[in-house]
Image: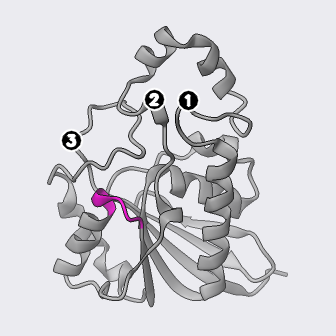
Amino acid sequence: MREEQSACLYLLRHGPTAAPPGCLLGSTDLPLSGQGLDRLAGLLPQLRDVEHWHCSPMLRARQTLDELRRLGCRTDAAAHDQRLREIDFGDWEMKGFAEIAAADPERVAAWQHYEDFAFPGGEAVAAFISRTRAMLADLAAAGGAVGAVTHGGIIRTMICLALGLPPRNYLLFDVRPASLTVLELFSGGGGVLRGLNL
């Protein structure tokens, strides 16, 4: 018998930025490129039931929230929460994987262990997972339909946590810019992925 639903999370990844393709974009506060936001209008029917909005304080997320508001979505009372920030890649910010692997192959190999890893000059993965888990719990506790404008790493990690998967599996989920992920959460814990890249 399925447990009672406690919340339905609508997780919206921010729109595209001007960051070079394939680079690690975390704590760098880039604006939106202005491209790809047209798809947000098609999401409005699915977002009309959202009762509470939360947003990453990063500029690209705030600008995406502003675009939702411009399109008529009720986001005026959105709460900005530091826990919704993307992970801080530290010295690897704005660099591509090939460049990083050539310069620091030992650390790249250590990255495969994931939860024990800390980005050089940046955030520890364990700390990132911990704040994401706490944010997910707060969103679930709010109940009802809850929306968050955030980042790919946060959304991927929330999917893993809600589905009971090890967070190291986050790359199994391709979360595209300006796309919607829907998670149904249950009162006793756990959840179901209802939509990805909507």
Residue sitting farthest toward the front: 121
Image quadrant where residue 99 sits: top left
Disc 3/disc 2 C-alpha distance (Å): 19 Å
The kind of residue tagged 2 is Asp
Classify mark 2: residues with Cα within 10 Å, few (<14), some (14-19) or many (20+): few
**Disc ID at residue 18:** 3
Labels 1 & 2 near each other (Cβ < 8 A): yes
Q: x and y percent of residue 3 in the render?
A: 79, 83
**Disc ID at residue 91:** 2
Q: Earlier in the sequence, mark 3 or mark 2?
A: 3
Q: x and y percent of residue 78 in the render?
A: 38, 82
In the picture, the quarter occupied by the C terminus is bottom left
The kind of residue tagged 3 is Ala
Q: Which residues are magenta?
A: 56-61
Classify mark 3: residues with Cα within 10 Å, few (<14), some (14-19) or many (20+): few
Q: Earlier in the sequence, mark 1 or mark 2?
A: 2
Disc 1/disc 2 C-alpha distance (Å): 6 Å
For label 2, the SS is: helix
**What residue sits 67% from the left and 27% below the top?**
112
On screen, residue 51 above or below 170: below
Residue sitting farthest toward the top: 102
In the image, is residue 169 part of the stretch drawn in magenta? no
For label 1, the SS is: loop
